[in-house]
Image (cartoon, helix red, strand yellow):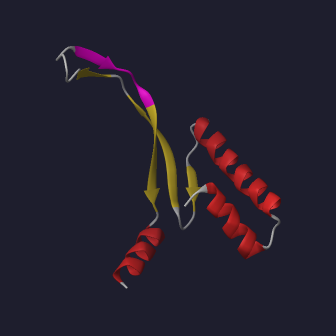
Amino acid sequence: MTKADIVARIYEKVGFSKKDATDVVEATFEIIKTSLEKGEKVKLSGFGNFIVNSKRPRKGRNPQTGEEITIVGRKVLTFKASQILKKDLNTISSS
């Protein structure tokens, strides 16, 4: 599913114009992105949690040369599905 698909479904279900539906989707994603950039946890009840974790720098090895390198620390985004979403997904797939 793409962002355009989400816009189309909002357009169909809610009856907003396509421009209004696009604005709603863009604003929602921007709010989520800004919150994550600030290090805030984003919890969507019944759906799941988006959390930014920090990975420490660590030692690695170049597989071609065998040379030891330092892999820089970075932030990673993780998503943990809610129990409701997990239950719904398993109910759908077992039908």
Percent x, y of residue 61: 22, 21
Residue at 40% in and 25% down: 73
Which range of residues does the magenta coloring cover? 68-74
Q: Is residue 49 positioned above or below 64 on the image?
A: below
- In the rendered view, does 79 fall on the left or right side of 27? left
Task: State the quadrant of the N terminus.
Answer: bottom right
Q: Is residue 71 positioned above or below 24 on the image?
A: above
In the image, 73 versus 23, the foreground residue is 23
Quarter location, residue 58: top left
Q: Is residue 76 magenta?
A: no
Tell which residue pokes out farthest to the bottom in this image: 95
Tell which residue pokes out farthest to the left in this image: 66
- In the rendered view, does 50 fall on the left or right side of 58? right
Percent x, y of residue 84: 47, 72
Q: How many marks?
A: 0
- In the rendered view, does 6 fall on the left or right side of 16? left
Q: Main secondary structure of the magenta part?
A: strand
Q: Is residue 72 magenta?
A: yes
Residue at 16% in and 17% down: 66
Task: State the quadrant of the C terminus.
Answer: bottom left
Q: Is residue 66 positioned above or below 26 on the image?
A: above
Percent x, y of residue 7: 69, 62
Quarter location, residue 80: bottom left
Residue at 67% in and 69% down: 9
Percent x, y of residue 92: 42, 79
Residue at 82% in and 60% down: 20
